[in-house]
Image: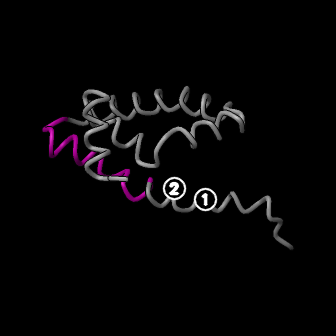
Amino acid sequence: MTERKADRWYYSFLPFNVAGGSTSPLIPLFITEGLAGNVAQVGIISAISSLASVPANIIWGNLSEHDLDWLFRKLPPAGLAIITVVSSPEQAGEIWHRCFRS
């Protein structure tokens, strides 16, 4: 069987699943050991995570190629990671300029 060039995108799932599979046991451990939570709280957090991922995946899947091009042109490579850990856009800009001076 010959491999078509268009089918190579499927290999991107390998690192994604390796990362997700290797870190998935850490979430319950962090809840029970780090936050002194119980099994019910682990279940609640797992359910909330699954519920949040459904609309996010639907939105991501419905983005057109034009939207994806715009998104990847406008956002810096580490932009989403920085934005999720700061409290204001100014703080994100300070961190960005400190780490990635142009």
**Range of magenta residues:** 20-37
Q: Nearer the viewer, residue 73 or 53?
A: 73
Going by the numbered disc 2, the residue's amino acid type is: Phe
Write the residue at 50% across / 32% down: 53
Dots 1, 2 in contact, CB < 8 A: yes
Residue receiving disc 1: 12
Query: Which residue is nearer to you in this view: 90 or 55?
Result: 90
Give the dominant element type of the magenta stretch: helix, strand or loop.
helix
Residue 23 position by quadrant = bottom left
Is 81 left or right of 29, judged from the image as shown? right
In the drawing, does residue 65 fall left or right of residue 85? right
Of residues 39 and 62, which is closer to you in this image? 62
Q: Position of residue 5 (x, y in %)?
A: 80, 64
The quarter holding residue 84 reads: top left
How busy is the neighbourhood of tag 2: few (under 14 within 10 Å), some, or many (20 plus)?
Answer: few
Q: CA distance from mark 1 to mark 2?
A: 7 Å
Q: Was residue 25 drawn as part of the magenta stretch in this picture?
A: yes
Question: Where is mark 2, residue-wise?
Answer: 16
